[in-house]
Amino acid sequence: PSWSKELFMVSSSDFIAEMQDPKRGWHSSKQMFVDLGAISNFHAYLTNVVYEDSDVYRDGLLNRYTDPGAGAFSYHQGNKWYATRNIRAGEELFNDYEERWFFHYVLASVANNEDLPRKASYRKAADILNLIRSNRTKIDQSFVDGLHTTLQQQGEKGRRIAHLFPRSASDFGQLMKMLDYEKENDVALSVARTTVLDRDVEWIEQNGRCLVHIVPKPSTISQAGMGAFAARPIKEGEVVVPAPALLQITNKTTLDMYRLRNYTAVKDEKPIGKQLILNYCFGHEQSSMVVCPASSANLVNHCGPRVKGEGQCDDRGPNAAVRWATDFDPETSQWL
């Protein structure tokens, strides 16, 4: 679909939505992954998580030939994630979206993006700092200015390295003192950490939201596929799971599905359905836009308060509600 190019096509656990990939033919599909696949950011050098490239596939949830719910959800149940190195408490998780794709596609419209540091820039900066340290070079403003001038004259690769060095002699000296406590092979990592905000556990406890109140399991509702289950007691009024709308589809008609003729969509006829992902997005009948949460909130199934019987929840009705996060995201008021 036309909106798929806006997604980070990386894997995550708990929830996956599939859609046909028109660029590769009728027999192929793309997948939308949430949680770690969408929430984690990219850093050219600080990548610290990776997924196992073989997701869980559960074809036995429903019978493809007899169950009416077949096709209403994906049989792909997500991937497992692993730390690629020791991660400090409070450290942000960074995914590998592939450097070339990130800089040349995601940041294509960002001014001077060709000067932003790449992975090789951090390694080269570490080499320079190790040389300065081994030579016991005097750090004064004249030296710092000369280093920046030299790097700027070396084209975009030099400018990328220059971005990693302080402009003042005092700040440069502080950087060198910090490196004195690091092993030589950790210098590039130490330099990379100076490019992000340092968040400790206390800051996260005050400003973050918990993503692990719920866990995925087969739903107790017939034909519903997977569902969300409380991993611990949740008090009434407590946030079950945040639902950041990282994907905004400005024109929901891009999710229309058409009859195929010679494996090509016939768009001069009426749509015959909608892409599966629309089931997990929010919108309004008077707006063409829909927003799609990028968290395990997608696992929470519908519980109708009026209809009881097979396929419905118990007589107590729904046990959760969707609300705008007015006390969490300062930009929510702009949407409302």
Image: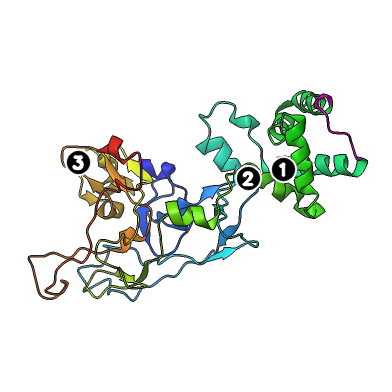
* Amino acid type, mark 2: Ala
The residue under the point 74% across, 25% down is 152
Q: Position of residue 243 (x, y in %)?
A: 34, 53
Q: Position of residue 6 (x, y in %)?
A: 42, 42
Labels 2 and 3: the sequence-earlier one: 2
Residue 28 in view of the camera = no
> In the image, 5: left or right of 225?
right
Which quarter of the rendered picture does the C terminus lie within? top left
Q: Nearer the viewer, residue 114 or 243?
A: 243
The residue under the point 74% across, 41% down is 175
Q: Nearer the viewer, residue 172 or 312?
A: 172
Q: Position of residue 331 (x, y in %)?
A: 34, 38
The residue tagged 3 is 269
The residue under the point 70% across, 50% down is 189
Give the answer, above or below, for where 282 lies relative to 297. above
Q: Circle 3 — which element?
A: loop
Labels 1 and 2: the sequence-earlier one: 2
Q: Is residue 225 magenta?
A: no
Q: Is residue 141 magenta?
A: yes
The residue tagged 1 is 122
Q: Circle 2 — which element?
A: loop
Q: Label 1 to label 2, Cα distance in Å?
A: 9 Å
Q: Position of residue 221 (x, y in %)?
A: 21, 73
Few, some or many residues within 10 Å of mark 3 (<14, 14–19, 20+): few
* Amino acid type, mark 3: Glu
Residue 155 in view of the camera = yes
Q: Which residues are magenta?
A: 136-142
Q: Nearer the viewer, residue 319 or 71?
A: 319
> In the image, 314: left or right of 195?
left
The residue tagged 2 is 44
Q: Is mark 1 in CB contact (under 8 Å) with mark 2?
A: yes
The residue under the point 57% across, 60% down is 89
